[in-house]
Amino acid sequence: MPQDMEKPQDPADLYLALGEDVNPARPILTGDVFENVAITDTDGSTVTRTVMVLDHPCSLRTDGFTLTPRLLTAEVRPTTAGSWRTGSFNRIFLPPPFPQAESKAAPCAAFFDSCYHVSPDQLRAGTRIACLSTLGINLMLQRRVKHFSRVTVESSKFQEANLGVYEEADLIEEWCTDRQDDGAKLDEAVAECVKWLRDGPAGRRPQDLLKDPQQRSTIRRQMRAAVRDLRALSDN
């Protein structure tokens, strides 16, 4: 029997942060939405769009720190309500409380068949107005795979495959927020955290251990200890 497509129980479950609640210290991730992004249209003209980042988390950066020169994005625009389960597979709906959505009957959506490549500078020149939750990212990936292949993959499969990456993004956000409170610049804090995550032999690095749910609380404690050590060095 074909696997059913999924939908959020509550539209708010799609979002980790919206509007002013988006933390600048959070690394750019799959499903992030930016408004006022200047892009090159098919006729060569420059237009301003709201876009969602589509690249998989592992494809976004060349070295764990530097964003790739070309990022794939989907146009976000107003649409009408549609079925999550039986159609409209070329998009993921972004209903309220998404900032640009007018109502439940008039949501926005990111359209997988209306895509643009942008540079990191183009993206950063816009304003990030939404970060999807892990559920939101998983549902977006489910719908994108459905659109291109007509195969339905359970959202839990994306969760299993990407759990370490999602945890890493949360950890980097926490590290950078703490370090900025200590006076560190954001780029410096990100570099510190990425270096710490990748320190050690393969299979035993914090980044590797984040893939194991049994290890995550230990890695978080170690991360907080590392931040305290950096703070102590700065104070001396």
Image: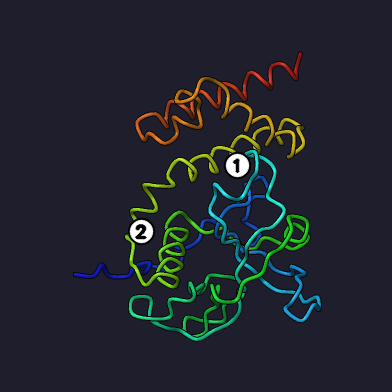
Q: Is residue 218 above or below residue 99?
A: above
Q: Quadrant of residue 177?
A: top right
Mark 1 Cα-neighbour bin, 10 Å: few <14, some 14–19, many ≥20: many
24 with respect to 110 (left or right): right
Q: Residue furthest left?
A: 1
Q: Residue at x 54, y 84 (%)?
A: 79
Residue toward you, 172 or 182: 172
Q: Residue at x 38, y 81 (%)?
A: 87
Q: Quadrant of residue 189?
A: top right
Instruction: Residue 17: give x, y in percent of width and height.
Output: 56, 57
What residue is shown with label 2? 155
Residue toward you, 106 or 112: 112
Instruction: Residue 204: give x, y in percent of width and height.
Output: 46, 23
Mark 2 Cα-neighbour bin, 10 Å: few <14, some 14–19, many ≥20: many
**Label 2 SS:** helix
Q: Is residue 162 above or below residue 83?
A: above
What residue is shown with label 1? 173
**Which quarter shows the N terminus?**
bottom left
Marks 2 and 1 sit apart, C-alpha to C-alpha, by 24 Å
Instruction: Residue 228: give x, y in percent of width and height.
Output: 62, 21
At label 2, the amino acid type is Ser
At label 1, the amino acid type is Glu
121 with respect to 156 (left or right): right
- In primary-sequence order, the first of circles 2 and 1 is 2
> Which mark is nearer the camera, 2 or 1?
2
